[in-house]
Image (cartoon, rainbow, N blue to C red):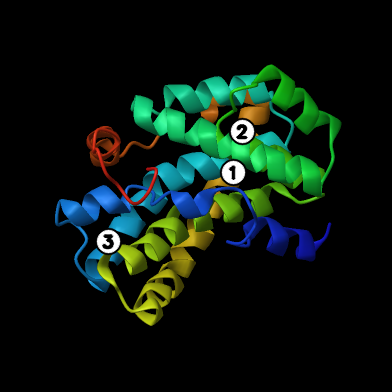
Amino acid sequence: MSRAALLVLADGRFPAGGHAHSGGAEEAVKAGRITDAESLESFCRGRLHSAGLVSAALAAAAVLGVSPGELDAAADARTPSPALRAAARKLGRQLMRAARATWPSPELDALARDFPKGAHQPVVLGLAARAAGLAPLDAAYCATYESVSGPASATVRLLSLDPFDATAVLARLAPELDGVADRAVEAARSAVDQGSDALPAASAPLLEIGAELHAAWPVRLFAS
C-alpha cells in the first residue's frame, strides 16, 4: 500500500473535475447561509456528517469489493435531487478518465463500460483507490476531505474569504473527519455481508433543495 498514491488521489490538483463544483456553497452564499469563516465551518460540518459520510461509506465499500452496480444504485437512492445525481455522475465520469490513465485496472474498465454516462463519483473513487492499492480507510478519508475542502476553496472565491481562514476551518474539522471516516469504514464492512442497505443514508434536505435552485440559475460560477 502506497501512502504516496493516497496523496495523489487526494490532491486537489488531481484532474478529477472537483474544482468546478462548490458542493452547494455557491447557493448557500447567495442565500446568506455562508457569510464568513464561522458560517462556512457550520456548513462544512453539516455536509461532512451527511453527504460526506454517505460518500465515504460508498467509497470504502467499493474498495472492499461490494458490487459497483449495487453501490451505484444505493448512491442513486440516497440522492433525491436530480441535479445532484447529475453532478455526481459528471464527477464520476471525469474521475474515471483520470483514474484509468493513472492506475489502469480491469475493474475500472468494466465500470466505464457498464456506466458510459458515468457512475456516481464515490463508487469510482473507491475503485480508483482499490486500483491504487489503497485501503478502505484511505478511500473514506479522500471522500470526507473532498466533502469539506470543495466548499471551503469555493467560498474563498465566492466571498473573497481569506484563504488562511478557510484552511483553518478544515484544520478545526480534522478530528471530525477522523470520526466520520471510521464510521464509514465500519458501515462498509457491514455492507460486505448485509448488502448496501447497511450503508448510511444520512440526508441533508437543504443541500438537495439548494442544488435544484442552483441548477436553474442562468449564470453561475460553479457547476454545482
Disc 1 + disc 2, Cβ < 8 Å: yes
Q: Residues within 10 Å of mark 2 (few under 14, many from 20)?
A: some
Identify the residue position indicated by label 1 in the image. Answer: 186
Estimate the x, y position of residue 43 in percent, counting from the top left: 29, 57
Q: Which residue carries the number 2 mark?
A: 190
Viewer-proximal residue, 14 or 1? 14
Q: Is residue 197 visible?
A: no
Q: Secondary structure at mark 1?
A: helix
- x and y percent of residue 25 in the render? 31, 53
Q: Is residue 175 visible?
A: yes
- The label shown at residue 42 is 3
Name above or below for residue 18 compared with residue 79. Answer: below
Earlier sequence position, callout 1 versus callout 3: 3
Q: Residue at x 24, y 38 (%)?
A: 218
Residue 207 placement: quadrant: top left
Query: Which quadrant of the view contains residue 213?
Result: top left
Q: Residue at x 59, y 27 (%)?
A: 118
Q: Residues within 10 Å of mark 1 (few under 14, many from 20)?
A: some
Q: CA distance from mark 1 to mark 2?
A: 7 Å
Residue 202, x across and y down, in percent? 38, 37
Question: Tag on residue 84?
Answer: none
